[in-house]
Image: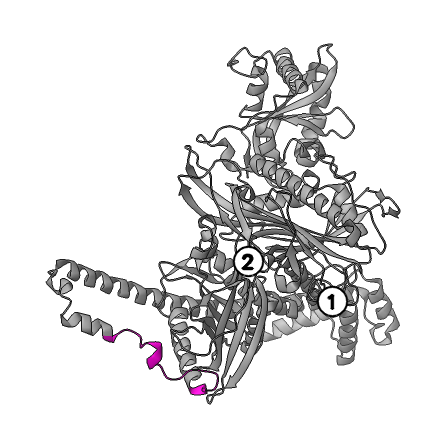
Amino acid sequence: MATKEKSSYQQQLEAGKYVRYTPEQVEALERVYTECPKPSSLRRQQLIRECPILSNIEPKQIKVWFQNRRCREKQRKEASRLQTVNRKLTAMNKLLMEENDRLQKQVSRLVYENGCMRNRIHTTSVATTDTSCESVVTSSQHQRNPPSQLPQRDANNPAGLLAIAEETLAEFLSKATGTAVEWVQMVGMKPGPDSIGIIAVSHNCSGVAARACGLVGLEPTKVAEILKDRMSWYRDCRSVDVLSIIPTGNGGTIELMYMQTYAPTTLASARDFWTLRYTTGLEDGSLVICERSLTPSTGGPTGPPAQNFLRAEMLPSGYLIRPCEGGGSMIHIVDHIDLDAWSVPEVLRPLYESPKILAQKMTIAALRHIRQIALESSGEIPYGGGRQPAVLRTFSQRLSRGFNDAVNGFADDGWSVMNSDGVEDVVIAINCSPNKLIGSVFPSSNPFFPTSGGILCAKASMLLQNVPPGLLVRFLREHRSEWADCGVDAYSAASLRAGSYAVPGLRPNTGFLGSQVILPLAHTLEHEEFLEVMRLEGHGFGHDDVVLPRDLYMLQLCSGLDESSLGACAQLVFAPIDESFSDDASLLPSGFRVIPLDSKTDNSGSNRTLDLASSLEVRSGSGGRATQAVSDSSDPNSYSSTRSVLTIAFQFAYENNLRDSVAAMARQYVRSVVASVQRVAMAISPSRIGSQIEPKQFPGASPEAHTLAQWIYRSYRFHTGAELFGSIDSQGSDAVLKQLWHHSDAIICCSLKAVPVFTFANQAGLDMLETTLIALQDISLEKILDEDGRKALCTEFPKIMQQGYASLPGGVCMSSMGRPVSYDLAVAWKVLTDDDSAHCLAFMFQNWSFV
């Protein structure tokens, strides 16, 4: 058998199917392959011709060698990938086994507590009513010793602080791997080799808590370094100061820390924390970083006081970092905080009582940041603009930080509140002291501040009913002309240039003169955050002696666009930039933030979008801040709804002689933006079609709308011989328009032009396109139809123009936000005027739904 195989191989060698390469030839081929791995490269052919040692090998044989070389490389990569996945699965399996063990312990504890409760129910009440019985004495023995009996715990007594640290470590580990907190897994967070990890939130515990377990491709020491740098990943963190570092005898360190955090909205005060952080190693090689607040009950030194901040408490929290076999780390994160929710207005308490919001802001954010750094280090994430990931991340942090500074307006940053015009719906704050801001928002090499002026911020907050935050922010991002004013954008762009500039007059409802183009720069691993440049084309504005370039540019940060992400904050922050877009470009961020509140049945809530600022009692707060109490109007038609808080802040540079004019412009502009956002929110709100909600008024004030409705109705009956409506409810002048507006099928009209654009749509049509009547004219028919739809329309178009109507097969089209919409049938007909001339085309999409 061996002889036959050998002779067969010899025959194949003689036939030229196989070639025996010398080591020198193999080395030469490897060099060529390394320099030019692409098979179609002309450089490869040149290298082969220039190599004498390869001249006696036929090109066909060289081609076969390169093919085999690519196959071997693919096999090695696939084997390496499978080994990596196998390591992840092994580690994840270990993690799931530990989680299962924890859950079994929790079940056992609950069963035990249930049995104890049953025994108590069946016992007599004598023992419980006798205050002199031993039970009272026994229970008192389990209480914590009062602070006076605790050992001296201050900065000069490391032994006392070490006792607090060890107690913090034990409590943290009982939360991370034990049953100290009843954890409930968050919906949509499924474990797997490519998932972010296991995410859980607390249930029935003091304060709010969140927990995450996941795998990352970094060593424990690197993970610990990243997590300790809270400013780099926790966007709500304003500052972290380590006031004292005390080494411990076991090789660990104790740090006394003071941290300030931003308030998420203008309606509440910011929080600060005075904590002890303990870093140490465990016997199994794990690294632990745990932290808790120092209070009179725990002992320890008293933290520094701060104005304009409310002291919040961090209960034992931290990070357990375990090394994995083959590299990487397994991380357990626990965040447990008491934010003193009773100090905020009742309508805002869900912001401080929701563990889902805490999970999104801190726990998941930390885990995502570590995974992002790990993938960037391995080079698996491409970035645009020729910039390094760290530079782009710095831009995102500067945008977020600048917007938070504007929303909070801290007095120690130089902010003060201007006197209002008597209506407290918009708060105007000014900053004439750039010293605090230089280095955070504005680099010192290119300061934004005018030499004889400052920065002005106009901000407002409002409550939205039943509007998904991600949907609203996506609409604001993709339809800037719906709410923005081109003159204000031109003014912001002029602020980048030296010299004086005039205050613009607002142009309500005029929109942009050109279109907007979004140029992506970077995005995070799970696409929850985008950094991009938005080019506003075709402006060509000129203000007095300042002539601006034709295009304007905005650096823009978008986050939270996923509507299915529970507790996620949606945000759109932007700042004008010039064409150079240098790494140290000055940024003056403005934008929107929408934070969801927990769903609840509200018996006193209104069905409409509420402007909180109009119902706030504003009184002077310390440091120039506005302390506001929220009151809500009542409505008999209550329903279960989702609420969210929208915060708007716009910043403008000004010169001293124009301060009052800029303030008036800013106040008027923010009010117009608030009105536009309210209109958009009501247009895209899913609750609008609910049976318990009063239907929105149709645009019946316009005589043109009545006329167009009559033309659409009569043309459909004339061409098809059928009735568009089953019956007219009334004989009034608005009966046809009302029936058309509330028709269940999407009815849309488009112009008869080379590039047809939409001119009118009923409510169902606006819902299908996810737009409004004002933004409808920015959408063309070609953009929403897919390739099959466009082919069907081109085929049937002559029939429509000759016969007057045609039926188009069902298919899929796209909304203005890029979401696919399926429909069963589309009917197109020619809309005729009173003199039988063609006015437009009408389309009716039947039984449409989002895919």
Could you tell me the amino acid type at mark 2?
A: Ala
Give percent across and percent down for residue 613.
Answer: 56, 44
Q: Which quadrant would residue 314 be assigned to in this image? A: bottom left
Residue 41 highlighted magenta (yes or no): no
**Left or right side of 479 for 639:** left
Residue 778 seen in the current view: yes
Crowdedness of circle 2 by 10 Å Cα count: few (<14), some, many (20+)? some
Give percent across and percent down for residue 330.
Answer: 49, 71
Give percent across and percent down for residue 582.
Answer: 79, 62
**Left or right side of 208 for 417:** right
Badge 2 marks a residue whose secondary structure is: loop
Mark 2 lies on residue: 263
Q: What stretch is highlighted in magenta?
A: 141-159
Could you tell me the amino acid type at mark 1?
A: Phe
Q: Which quadrant would residue 52 be assigned to in this image? A: bottom right
**Of 342 and 793, which appears nearest the observer?**
342
How far is mark 1 from mark 2, CA to CA?
61 Å
Badge 1 marks a residue whose secondary structure is: helix
Mark 1 lies on residue: 66
Point out the image quarter for the N terminus. Answer: bottom right
**Of 564 and 152, which appears nearest the observer?**
152
Give percent across and percent down for residue 254.
Answer: 49, 81
Point out the image quarter for the C terminus. Answer: top right
**Left or right side of 340 for 744:** right
Residue 146 highlighted magenta (yes or no): yes
Which callout, 1 or 2, points at the residue further toward the start of the chain?
1
